């Protein structure tokens, strides 16, 4: 992650925002003391982090997700085709 001063960030705001949104690269903005830094990320990356936190906020859900990851890694997962319930068919009900 790139670290820049608040002054440099302010003077090149548009280019840093382009980098953050287009390249999904966070930027750390410092104010003399790295302990008082802020991290700028894209809205898309922020929403993704929020979704991940939500999915792992329940212990039971986290266990299920890690189990699924393990099955995928060990090639035990079964690929299934999803059914689109909104798809129109030629058959009358």
Image (cartoon, grey):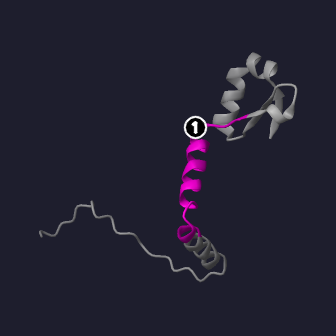
x and y percent of residue 76 in the render?
A: 59, 83
Question: Is residue 43 inside the magenta stretch?
Answer: yes
Viewer-side residue, 65 vs 73: 65
The quadrant of the image that shows the C terminus is bottom left
- Give the residue number, with chain letter if any, for mark 1: 43
Vertical placement of residue 56 versus 37, above or below: below
x and y percent of residue 16 in the render?
A: 72, 27
Q: Secondary structure at mark 1?
A: helix
User: Residue 82 lies in what quarter of the image?
Assistant: bottom left
Question: Is residue 53 inside the magenta stretch?
Answer: yes
Range of residues picked out in magenta: 39-62
User: Residue 69 lies in what quarter of the image?
Assistant: bottom right
Viewer-side residue, 15 vs 66: 66
Crowding at dot 1, Cα within 10 Å, few <14 / some 14-19 / many 20+, comes out as: few
Q: Residue furthest bottom?
A: 76
User: Residue 87 lies in what quarter of the image?
Assistant: bottom left
């Amino acid at each position: 992650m790139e670290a820049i001063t608040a002054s440099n960030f302010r003077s090149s705001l548009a280019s840093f925002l382009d980098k953050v949104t287009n390249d999904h690269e966070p930027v750390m903005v410092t104010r003399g003391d790295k302990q008082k830094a802020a991290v700028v990320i894209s809205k898309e990356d922020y929403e993704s982090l929020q979704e991940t936190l939500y999915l792992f906020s329940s212990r039971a859900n986290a266990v299920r997700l890690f189990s699924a990851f393990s099955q995928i890694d060990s090639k035990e997962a079964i690929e299934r085709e999803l059914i689109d319930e909104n798809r129109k068919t030629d058959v009358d009900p």
